[in-house]
């Protein structure tokens, strides 16, 4: 059976709208009511209308590809989100280009390449203040979504924040519910803006007075001594809460558990925070498809999907 090639005019006629409205729905442009958008999409689905992203890119003189920029040292935590972005982008007839940055000096060259390829949508992951200058220039004519980055005062940079306060509060409460005593470990790698969320949340959620907060140092023996002293004082197993697994592990069998407030799935015996990455990716794609003219600060709460304590 020969497949009929329908046009935008055909879709407009069947949906009872103007061809320009169909074009805005397909290209995710302008403000369209939910009812009208759903009516147009229903006709497109009924006709099995296939959008040609290459032809659309040639008409618009811009690529439908989404570039994702991240430092290589965050690759482990970036992979689950990257996989979700690829899945959501494919469903939206888009491609995702992964752009890991090995050295800060590479940033300008990669942004130049992204610009040359007419890529207008960029997702940036991680707190990298040194990237701000180059990204502000790129954002003058393009859309940048920055996840857990520094505050940027640009209408084309959309800031997304992980809700670390909620995460730390939930981890602390869960520790007490399981008969563990929570101890917060902060390292030099924790950004100042993140620490400003984490520390007050831990203090407020803590039943102990004073809350136990330790700095991770290169002196493992001093840290072990501090942990051992806390354990003696409270007389309970400890839950050590930190960002990601440190370079060393304090190992007291049956007395210490670990919890990380960022995704780190490879540690099966630790408590980890798991984001609903498909939900996050879907919302990011929505922000890209329907950008606003004002800075949009979104907060995604880390959802604890699976959490267990070993005793």
Image (tube, grey):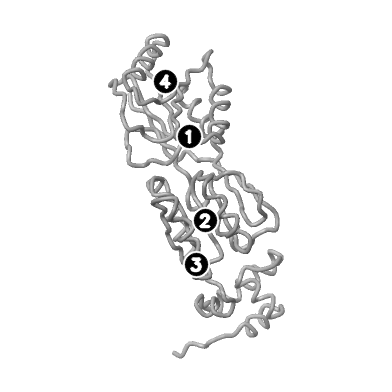
Which element carries disc 4, helix, strand or loop? loop
Q: Residue at x 41, y 31 (%)?
A: 259
Q: What is the CA distance from the residue labelled 3 to the residue labelled 2?
A: 11 Å
Using the image, tell me which numbered label, if any, was put on residue 190: 1
- Residue 163 coordinates in the image, percent (x, y): 56, 39
Q: Earlier in the sequence, mark 4 or mark 2?
A: 2
- Residue 268 coordinates in the image, percent (x, y): 32, 37
Q: How busy is the neighbourhood of tag 4: few (under 14 within 10 Å), some, or many (20 plus)? A: many
Which element carries disc 2, helix, strand or loop? strand
Using the image, tell me which numbered label, if any, was put on residue 65: 3
Using the image, tell me which numbered label, if any, was put on residue 123: 2
Q: What is the CA distance from the residue labelled 4 to the residue labelled 2?
A: 38 Å
Which element carries disc 1, helix, strand or loop? loop
Q: Nearer the viewer, residue 273 or 251?
A: 251
Q: Residue at x 41, y 9 (%)?
A: 233
Q: How busy is the neighbourhood of tag 3: few (under 14 within 10 Å), some, or many (20 plus)? A: many
Quarter of the image for the N terminus: give it. Answer: bottom left
Q: What is the CA distance from the residue labelled 3 to the residue labelled 1?
A: 32 Å
| Position of residue 133 in the picture relative to residue 90 (left or right) | right
Using the image, tell me which numbered label, if any, was put on residue 235: none
Q: Are marks 3 and 4 in contact (CB under 8 Å)?
A: no
Which residue is the site of mark 4? Answer: 180
Q: Are marks 3 and 1 in contact (CB under 8 Å)?
A: no
Q: Earlier in the sequence, mark 1 or mark 4?
A: 4
């Amino acid at each position: 059976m020969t497949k009929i090639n329908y046009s935008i005019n055909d879709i407009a006629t069947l949906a009872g709208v103007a061809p320009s409205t169909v074009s805005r729905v397909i290209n995710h442009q302008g403000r369209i009511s939910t009812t009208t958008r759903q009516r147009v999409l229903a006709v497109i689905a009924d006709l099995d209308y296939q959008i040609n992203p290459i032809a659309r890119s040639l008409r618009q003189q811009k690529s439908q590809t989404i570039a994702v920029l991240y430092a290589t040292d965050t690759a482990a935590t970036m992979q689950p989100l990257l996989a979700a972005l690829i899945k959501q982008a494919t469903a939206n007839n888009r491609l995702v280009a992964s752009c890991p940055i090995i050295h800060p000096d590479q940033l300008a060259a990669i942004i130049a390449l992204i610009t040359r390829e007419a890529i207008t949508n960029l997702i940036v992951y991680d707190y990298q203040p040194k990237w701000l200058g180059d990204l502000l220039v790129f954002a003058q004519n393009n859309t940048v979504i920055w996840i857990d980055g520094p505050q940027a005062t640009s209408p084309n940079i959309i800031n997304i924040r992980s809700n670390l306060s909620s995460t730390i509060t939930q981890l602390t409460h869960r520790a007490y519910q399981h008969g563990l005593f929570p101890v917060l470990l902060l390292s030099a790698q924790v950004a100042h803006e993140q620490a400003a969320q984490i520390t007050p949340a831990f203090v407020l959620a803590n039943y102990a007075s004073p809350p136990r907060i330790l700095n991770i140092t290169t002196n493992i023996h001093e840290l072990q001594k501090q942990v051992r002293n806390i354990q003696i004082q409270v007389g309970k197993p400890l839950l050590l809460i930190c960002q990601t697994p440190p370079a060393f592990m304090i190992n007291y069998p049956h007395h210490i558990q670990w919890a990380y407030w960022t995704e780190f799935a490879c540690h099966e015996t630790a408590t980890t925070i798991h984001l609903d990455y498909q939900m996050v990716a879907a919302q990011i794609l929505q922000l890209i498809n329907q950008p606003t003219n004002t800075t949009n600060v979104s907060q995604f709460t880390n959802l604890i999907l699976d959490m267990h304590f070993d005793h």
